[in-house]
Image: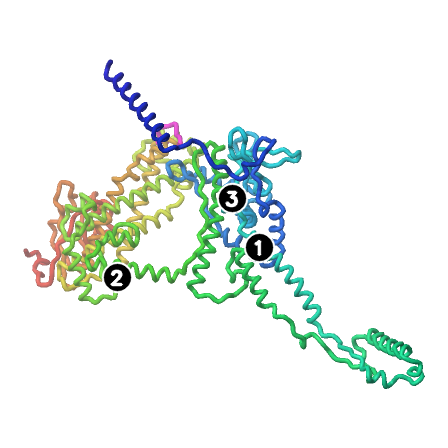
Amino acid sequence: MNIIDRYRSWNTKRKTRKYFHNISRAINSRLEGGRQTREKWEKQFSWYEGIMIHRSEFRNKDVMESLKLIRDLNPTASMAIWNFLRLSNTGHELECLKPTGSNDKQGLDYINDLAKRVGALYGGGTDQLINVLHLTAFTQGAICLEVELNEGLNDVVDFHAVDPTSVDFRKDKETGEIQLVQKQSDGTYKVLNREQVFYQPLDPDIGDPYGRSPILPVLQVVFFQTEVLKDLKAVAHNQGHARFDISIVEESILKNIPPSIASQGEQAVRQFVGKYISDIETAFNKLKPDDNFIHPDSVKVEMTGGTNGKSMDATALINIINQQLVASLKQLPILLGLNETSTETHGTVQWQIYVAGIESIQRGVKRVIERAYNVALQVQGKQSKARLTFNKLRTTDRFQDAQAEQIETNTWIARVTQGWADNNEASNAVVGHDAVAEPQAPVSASTAIARSRRVQVKRQPKTRADDTEDEYVKEMQGDWVPEVAVLTTKAADDFYNLLQNQVEAYISRLEEADTPPTRVLIDVHRFMYSNNRKDLSDVPKSFIDWIKSNILTDEGEQLELWDAAGFDWMEQSAKIAGMYNIMEIDTELVFDDTDDDFLRSLSDRSRRAVELIQGVTDEHVIMALWDVAFEGQYSVTKAANALREDFAFSKGRARTIARTEMVGAARTGQWHSDKQSGMVIGKKWRAALQDRTREGHRKADEDPAVLLDQPFYVENGEGQLEPLMFPGDTSLGASADNVINCRCWYKRILEGEEHLLEGGE
């Protein structure tokens, strides 16, 4: 038996022992397979294919219809529904994500197009369909949606909202599966496909898959309210209007009985009195509203009822009913026009609870809509998943949030100041990422405190152990170098992300534009046999125009993105260099990083840099696509690969940009801090004097010193002299040849060293 057979034998024995061990444990612990308990609806006897799961008497179709009626006719219930629908559907966002988690643009375009045409019965559009589902959930406590596919099963016809009371659940006798069924006109039940018909209950009870209506208690309150209003109507009818109180004065009638009648006895007197009263009644009944009263002394007329009458005060009873309505409709009193005194804190808590209720119903609608969209993507052959996100309802006051955030920030500042936490720990707690610069003194601090703080910063470790310094920058000289070297590494990562976003945007447009038009391809073929491909001058104008109108269509937007990112990093670098530089001159001095000239120069530098960067990017895009076209058999795939592999979008270029701009910005901060000090009068160009040092920069190293506010004149790659206020400066028009990856610097000439300006040593 070889080693493989022995291993197999050992493995089989091990699995056998494990199997019997598990059985032994199960026997010893008396475990049993299968379900031991039963649902109450499983006890019923059924001749049919399955056991029906009946709705409770309070959730049957008749009750739901009553709820719909009350919802639409009762003013308070109608207002509650109105409020809920407007607050629950304030807008949403759709996303389409690939299995890798990245965005699927084509999938998103498809479901966005689908969103415009679903819910055709309700006017079309997912927004309207969501309103219908929210209304169903709030009224009936359940959501039901069907996805209708075409005959070819390759596209969606529509999404249909289904009345939850029209479907039922039953358990299949043979398989034990819980099925969703719908009763047909012939009395049979059709089993619905759970992959296309989705039922989402709201707060279901044990053993009841149908869900519970949030507003079911309103039935009892409204019925009671109706009876009370009927009683109040009768009371108002009887007591709300003033009426005549007509009385007959008996003594007056008896005195006026004719003697002939009185002599006839009691019966004759009774008849006379009866006729007398009847005549009075008839006379009053015949009176018109504007008739005057004329009557004998035997008749007395007064008023009763109306404003003079008293009745039970119904206000307390109405208030009780209103409280019951508010509770049963899950509403806030103020939303129903019922103002109740409440503290601000209690009001905020009540609103948060109300919003939480809305969000719980939104989650049910979200699940159903997402499942429907996923079916739509599936029949399109896509594995991507849809994600729907409702716009958040604000539950807190922005001013209070800002105050709380300010207090928390100040607390972390105090911790860093006291040495209880480091700068990165505080930064992660406050803004979610490592600090991008060393702590700065508070604005309100005095000059002495600010200076003390800067000296303290200088003595502390400048970087964390996990911060990586740029290899190119860290070889330079200066106290600011380690921190700027770390910032350069981070800036390079940021710039690389920008470049990657750019190339993906360009590739997306390539895919949309497809192959260039025939006229452009004809020009390409003509150039293939008559020209080379050295630079842009060799590319047909029609080809360049096609790229600019189809691919490079957002130059302004790209410039803004680069300007925002570039200025942020450059500002940090310039401020750090300026701070350390001025302390080297005099520790009593403080660099003013809010100086207008300083900030304006940084802003101008950033704008010049991004225009150069984007210009180079555009040129590389045109040349990369031209190379593909020049080789013949142009295709979108080849073009996309060419862009992805081009240096313009590489990490190497991102590093070059970061090094050039961060060092140049640091030199800007140095020059402005020298100027602010009032002690620097001149400067002497110093070259790095390495193998890669430019020839023009070597020559500048031999030139005499100049005044601080005068430029150096340095040869570019073509031997032409260009003015620079300091190494890396572009404010006077220096070309890229003179600034890219430049590590030159200048030596300060201070007051009292005037002889150095005259060529002395």
Q: In which quarter of the image is the C terminus?
A: bottom left
As drawn, 453 above or below 611: below
Give the magenta-colored segment's residue range. Answer: 628-636
As drawn, 237 above or below 708: below
Disc 1 versus disc 3: distance between alpha carbons? 20 Å
Q: Furthest-left residue in view?
A: 761
Work out whether residue 363 can be spotted: yes
Q: What element carries label 2?
A: loop
Q: Which mark is residue 218?
A: 1
Q: Is mark 3 on a helix, strand or loop?
A: strand
- Check residue 631 for magenta coloring: yes
In contact (CB < 8 Å): disc 1 and disc 3: no
Q: Would you call the spot at circle 1 few (<14 residues within 10 Å), some (14-19), or many (20 or more)? A: many
Q: Mark 3 points at which residue?
A: 201
Q: In which quarter of the image is residue 387?
A: top left
Q: Position of residue 309 (x, y in %)?
A: 67, 75
In primary-sequence order, the first of circles 1 and 3 is 3
Disc 2 versus disc 1: distance between alpha carbons? 64 Å
Q: Mark 2 points at which residue?
A: 594
Q: Would you call the spot at circle 3 few (<14 residues within 10 Å), some (14-19), or many (20 or more)? A: many
Which three-letter amino acid code belongs to the residue tagged 3? Pro
Q: Is mark 1 on a helix, strand or loop?
A: helix
In contact (CB < 8 Å): disc 2 and disc 1: no
Q: Where is residue 742 in the image (x, y as percent from the top left)?
A: 19, 46
Q: Which mark is residue 355?
A: none
Which three-letter amino acid code belongs to the residue tagged 2? Thr
Residue nearer the viewer, 349 or 447: 349
Judged left or right of residue 297, residue 388 is left
Q: Position of residue 269 (x, y in %)?
A: 89, 79
- Check residue 508 for magenta coloring: no
Which residue occupies 37% across, 59% down? 401
Viewer-side label of 2, 3? 3
